[in-house]
Image (cartoon, rainbow, N blue to C red):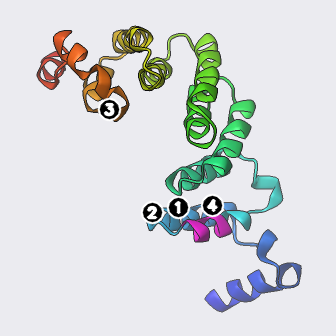
Amino acid sequence: MKDMTERSDQANNNGNETCSPIGTKVRMQRANGFRILEMYEDAEEELSKISPEDRLERDVLTMKLAVRQDAEDWNSMLKTARILRHQDPDASEWWIAEAYALRRSESMEAACEVLLDAEKRHPDDPCIKYNLSCYSCQQEDMKTALRYLLAAVELDAKYKKLALADEDLVEMREVLLKLGFSSESLSDEA
């Protein structure tokens, strides 16, 4: 059976594997396996062999995003995140992914702009507020950072614990401890 698959794969498009008869699901599984093994070039190659009609499917783009994030390929991740955000602007995770890639490929300021737009569309998303807190702290705007962090914690208490461990918020750690942020108080709430 393997020989038939290989021959079929090679015969397709005169040996060009870009439109292989191997299905998208299998290609995605292979790409994820390579991603887990930190073989990012192999993962990208596997994703490039997915049929053109499936390449803009959400699952395929989500896998590309994960591979590119893990590979720290910020420019490619940014392109993929933007496609996902435009396809599904009601999903806050794509806004956050775009900001994450922007922070690393362009600037903190550009990332903040995306998150501020995201906050308008998703006013009750604690992860957006938490990320705005992190970015504000990194820009040394502690008042804004604290305001966003408290808003995130009000929406979801898990951010209280995350804040103490987050390197982006290290400059606020003393203030957070004075405000009662601690892993013990969080476990009491659980």
Determine which of the numbered discs, if any, sits on residue 65 in the image.
none
- Of the two numbered discs 2 and 3 in the rendering, the one whose residue sits closer to the viewer: 3
Query: What is the quadrant of the C terminus in the image?
Result: top left
- The part of the chain drawn in magenta is 40-46
Tag 2: residue type? Ile
Determine which of the numbered discs, if any, sits on residue 32 in the image.
1
Position of 68 relative to 42 (above/below): above
Residue 125: in magenta span: no
What is the spatial separation of the Cα atoms under label 4 and label 3, in whole angstroms?
35 Å
Badge 3 marks a residue whose secondary structure is loop
Q: Which residue is mark 3?
A: 166
Q: Which x, y percent locates residue 134? A: 42, 25
Kindly identify the residue that appears in the image at 72 percent across and 47 percent down: 57
Furthest residue toward bottom: 3
Contact (CB < 8 A) between labels 4 and 2?
no
What is the spatial separation of the Cα atoms under label 1 and label 2, in whole angstroms?
6 Å
Disc 3 crowd rating (10 Å Cα; few below 14, some 14-19, many 20+) is few
Tag 3: residue type? Asp
Kindly identify the residue that appears in the image at 60 percent across and 34 percent down: 107
Q: Which of disc 1 and disc 4 is earlier in sequence?
A: 4
Q: Which residue is mark 2?
A: 36
What is the spatial separation of the Cα atoms under label 3 and label 1, in whole angstroms?
27 Å
Contact (CB < 8 A) between labels 4 and 3?
no
What is the spatial separation of the Cα atoms under label 2 and label 3, in whole angstroms?
24 Å
